[in-house]
Structures are given as C-alpha cells and as structure tokens.
Image (cartoon, rainbow, N blue to C red):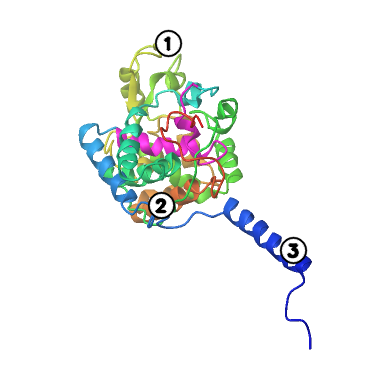
Amino acid sequence: MANAKMPFSLLAFFCLLLQLFSIFHIGNAELEMNYYRESCPRAEEIIRQQVETLYYKHGNTAVSWLRNLFHDCVVKSCDASLLLETARGVESEQKSTRSFGMRNFKYVKVIKDALEKECPGTVSCADIVALSARDGIVMLKGPKIDMIKTGRRDSRGSYLSDVETLVPNHNDSLSSVLSNFNTIGIDVEATVALLGAHSVGRVHCVNLVHRLYPTIDPTLDPDYALYLKNRCPSPNPDPNAVLYSRNDRETPMVVDNMYYKNIMAHKGLLVIDDELATDPRTAPFVAKMAADNGYFHEQFSRGVRLLSETNPLTGDQGEIRKDCRYVNSN
C-alpha cells in the first residue's frame, strides 16, 4: 500500500509555492469595482458628498478635480504623485510650468479628512483623485460614469523631472498629443473626446497671446480674435495676474459638445483646437461629437475610464497616505 503521507520535501515545496503565489497575487492585484465595499463601505458616498458640498461653495473645484486626473495619470501612473508638496525629500510636481494655473489642492484635504474620520488609513489619495473627477464631471452636467474602478495605492515619491515631457503643453502639436495618449493606451477617438474637457475651465493669456500678437492667427475667427484681444490686451501679460479667457463662452461650466461646435467655427483658444478640427485623423470624430452630445458623452466616459486606469499601483505597491500632501513618515 502506498504511503498516504506526502514526503516532507514535497510538502515544503508546495508550501513555498503557495507563499510565492500569494506574494505575487497581492503585489499584482487589479483594480475592481467597489473595492472598499468591506473596508470602508461609505467611501464613494463620502467622496461624492464632499465633491457636491465643495462645488456649491467653490464651483471651480469641479474643474480642478477633472484636471487633477489628467495631470496625475499621464505622468507615470494614477498614483496621486501630483498631490505631493515639496517636503521630506520630495520635489512637488506642482512646481512645473505644466501645472501653471492649477488650484484647489487644499480642498483635497477636506475630502481626505472626511474619509480618515470614517475609515482611518484605508482610502488612497489616488482613488480620491479618480472618484472626485468622476463626481466633479456630474456636477459639471457631464455624463455619469459608473464604471470607475478603485483599489489604487499612492506613490512614495513624485516625478517632477518627467512632467515637462509627459504632460502636453498648451500649444503642443496634435501629433505629439496623440502620440502621448497612445503611449498610455488611449486611442484617437477617446483622445478627441478627452480634449472635450476644454469645454470647461479657462486658458491664461500667457498661453494664447502668441495667436494674437504681433498679428492675429489667420485660422481664428476674426470676431472671436477681437474678443480674445479684449480679454488679453497685452502681448506680454503678467503671469501672476489673473488674465484669461474661458474655453467656452456659451456653456463655460458644462461638459458638453459646445467645444466641438466652437472649434469647427474656428473659435478655439489653442493651436491644437484648430488642428483637432482640421486634421483628417481627428476631424471626423470632431464633426460627429459636434452633432451628437450623447456620442460625445459616451466617448468621454470611455476616455476617462481608460485614463483613470493608467498603470496604477495596487496590492502591496506604494502606500495609503495619511495626508495626501506628504508621504508617510514611517
């Protein structure tokens, strides 16, 4: 009769294999829907409530949440590296010229504090970035995006030296922007939709005066160019002054397809706006989005989902910051 007991060496091998599998599995976990259903069941509700409260006190916070998602996720990973301040050996990404005009970082702490009160050390700052963007889009009358996964973890450092390369400049070429998005797995159609975020927010005069002075860019609608010159009366605006033009004069705080209608009428603020409407790679999508707000919302939702899942830290990678502004001290 065969020995029913497993030889010790074989048993030890299987135990080791099980441990290695466990380590691998935890360290390479994936994002999932409702990640906090057991550890912090009210997490997403709390974030939504805070986003709504902040919106009614400071309406522009909703735009900030959307911009945070873009600036965080295109730089290496959706890991809240953007939120880190310069401290404890970290150089903040907020110091980059690409972060010019970004604001409302202080209100992220309001959201984080509410979560820490409910579930200490549980909800990551990276998930706050993703979920606040989702809920901010709703406050801006954009689509309700249900399929935002969670389970991201926070970086232990920043990537300031990479920001200038990875975050598109206001006046980068369309080819450059399409290439950058393609690198992180976002196709042309979704990229065109994500650029529809230009339907909200504003552009500071320092980023558009080159289209107005010394001569007006001939691709601009002449009447619109005169309006822009009234908004930006000097070819050398003070970068510290709050001189800007809204991306969309008709519905400036609504995520809708008016942006595409405007750029087809040569009323875009940036060079890329004009290129988007005329380049054969993107013009068909622009025309379709201009004609169909539902189609734009559908593709915008898809783009946001793709963006929010860019190379996240999960499992035992990174950490859960206690304060989104600083890496943990221990």
Q: Nearer the viewer, mark 1 or mark 3?
A: 3
Q: In this view, does 311 lie to the left or right of 36?
A: right
Q: Is mark 3 on a helix, strand or loop?
A: helix
Give the percent coordinates (x, y) of residue 72: 48, 36
* Mark 2–mark 3 distance (CA, rounded to whole Å): 47 Å
Q: Is residue 185 left or right of residue 267?
A: right
> For mark 2, what is the residue?
301
Q: In this view, does 223 lie to the left or right of 215?
A: left
Q: Is mark 2 on a helix, strand or loop?
A: helix
Q: Which portion, as a residue range, is magenta?
A: 61-87
> Which tag, 2 or 3, sits closer to the chain's start?
3
> For mark 1, what is the residue?
236
What amino acid is found at the position of numbered circle 3 in the picture?
Phe
> For mark 3, what is the residue?
13
> Which tag, 1 or 2, sits closer to the chain's start?
1
* Residue 95 against residue 3 in the figure, above or below: above
In terms of depth relative to the viewer, which is nearer, 21 or 214? 21
For disc 3, the neighbor class at 10 Å (few under 14, some 14 to 19, many from 20) is few
Q: Is residue 231 shown in magenta?
A: no
* Residue 166 against residue 14 in the figure, above or below: above
For disc 1, the neighbor class at 10 Å (few under 14, some 14 to 19, many from 20) is few
Q: Could one spot residue 27 in this view of the protein?
A: yes
For disc 2, the neighbor class at 10 Å (few under 14, some 14 to 19, many from 20) is many
Name the residue: 24% across, 31% down.
58
In terms of depth relative to the viewer, which is nearer, 230 or 127? 127
* Mark 1–mark 2 distance (CA, rounded to whole Å): 38 Å
Q: Is residue 79 shown in magenta?
A: yes
